[in-house]
Image (spheres, rainbow, N blue to C red):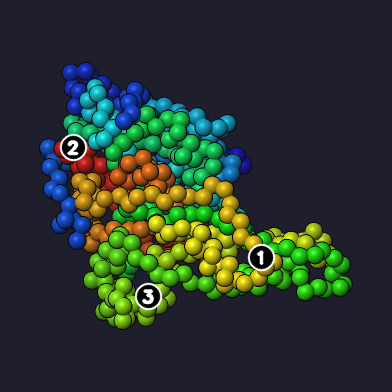
Amino acid sequence: MSGKRKLQLGVTVGALLLSARLPLAAQGSSSHQAGAPTSQSPAVTISSPSPIGDTTALAKEAQGWLIDMVRTNTTNPPGNEQAIAKYLAHVLEKEGIQSEMLDLAPGRSALVARLRSSALADPSKALLLVAHMDVVGVDRSKWTVDPFAAVMKDGYLYGRGSIDDKGMLAANLAAFIALKRSNARLNRDVIFLATADEEQGGDASIRILISKYWDKFAAGYALNEGGEVFMKNGRVQYVAVQASEKVAMNVMVVARGNSGHASRPTKDNAVVHLAAAVAKIGGYSAPAHFTTIVRRYFEQLAAIEPDELGKWMRVLDSEDRGEHAQKVVSEASPLWNSMMRDTVAPTMLSAGVRNNVIPAEARANLNIRLLPGNTIDVLLAALTKLVADPQIKFELQPDAGLAAPPSSLESDFYATISKVATAQYGSAPVLPFQSTGATDSAQLRLHNVQAYGLVPFPLTEEDYLRVHGDDERLPVASFTKGVDVLARIVAEFAASK
């Protein structure tokens, strides 16, 4: 990697507590076996007070891990996640925690480690902490700093992956190590998993990881990215916990005509037909549809939004005012618009071989996000009717996402997340969230895992807009707070019965 520096570790060596006489203590092991929401959720029984004390020093350590990981370029493709997996293994080893490398492809590995609650694992109770090591690419010319230098400036840590998803990875690691150092008596196994190929979903993704190594990290519950702590005007407005997500897929729009000399334009020019089709598709808005989670999200959000906007959120699904309400809310936020309907975004165009040749074919990629339960056939039928051009064909691309069932809003883990987040974020409401982006949680839900998403760092709209964009950055104060909150969520649930 260009500009790569030798990884520096600033980790205090923890005591190794692997005594067989303490089967319920937090123990590191590489041996594995398979296997308003708060008011409506069952009570969570805690066997003892949280063992997590002041996390200031821990957050400082975690900041060092994050800096090292940002400086390790894992742009996907090619990924090179094994470099970070080895780094994480070394950090864990310093704490007396054994880990295991799960090889997926040359240079691409996941990493798993476990704190055991007893000699015999119970996957149905286990908690999985998951985050991915790969990042999306960058256009260096658009960044004001080196995207892989982890520059600290004006209270922010700049770098690709600082939010998505190395910040979460560092926070998971901190929570896992805090639990080990506390020697807490656990009532469930806690598993740390660093995954590869999340951004591409290819041959080193969690789908392959599950097919090859499921017994290494099988769990009943999981905490991952996908949710958010939304901050505005210097305070946390709400905490959104992802319990479902839209289904990602790509469709190629193909226009075909006759090739020829550009000095003699023809009516069947593939570029012209493609351009007309893309223009129509770009203006298309699918009908609104409200899943249970989205309906509940807006119902609760309406209580804290300004009166005028809240009024329309309360009638989004009504027969008489729903259509107008949907228009108002959609125009207020691209996120809210996408939560209510299938979306289609043209993302790539290709055509032609020379400037003076009319091409026989022109292509455009459509990135589609379907609501859970909706089918691509219905959407493509609507787009075909909209375009109404026999020269245009739609081709579904391979590796389409799969719809997964939502995670329960009544589980003990959801209740724990809600309880701790509300206490730590000034009584901010906790909302169930259906993310518009795809995460590894979908594959976990397909394997009966109650998976929830919560990036625990308080972030503004501007911060979120930089994810996958230019000058991605994470506020240092938000990272410090997020480490504390995540550690407390994990410790409380790990001790609960």
Instruction: Specify the label residue 283 is tagged with.
Output: none
Q: Nearer the viewer, mark 3 or mark 1?
A: 1
Q: What residue lies at 51% left-to-right and 45% top-to-bottom?
A: 201
Instruction: Specify the label residue 392 is tagged with.
Output: 1
Can residue 443 be seen? yes
Residue count near mark 3 (Cα–Cα under 10 Å), binned few <14, some 14–19, many ≥20: many
Q: Look at the numbered disc 1 and give the secondary structure of its residue.
A: strand
Q: Look at the numbered disc 2 and give the secondary structure of its residue.
A: helix
Q: Name the one closer to the observer, 66 or 86.
A: 86
* Cα–Cα gap, marks 1 and 2: 58 Å
Spot occupied by residue 384 in the image (x, y as percentages of width and height): 58, 67
Residue count near mark 2 (Cα–Cα under 10 Å), binned few <14, some 14–19, many ≥20: many
Spot occupied by residue 246 in the image (x, y as percentages of width and height): 42, 56
Q: Is residue 377 left or right of residue 484?
A: right
Spot occupied by residue 431 in the image (x, y as percentages of width and height): 27, 60
Q: Are marks 3 and 1 in contact (CB under 8 Å)?
A: no
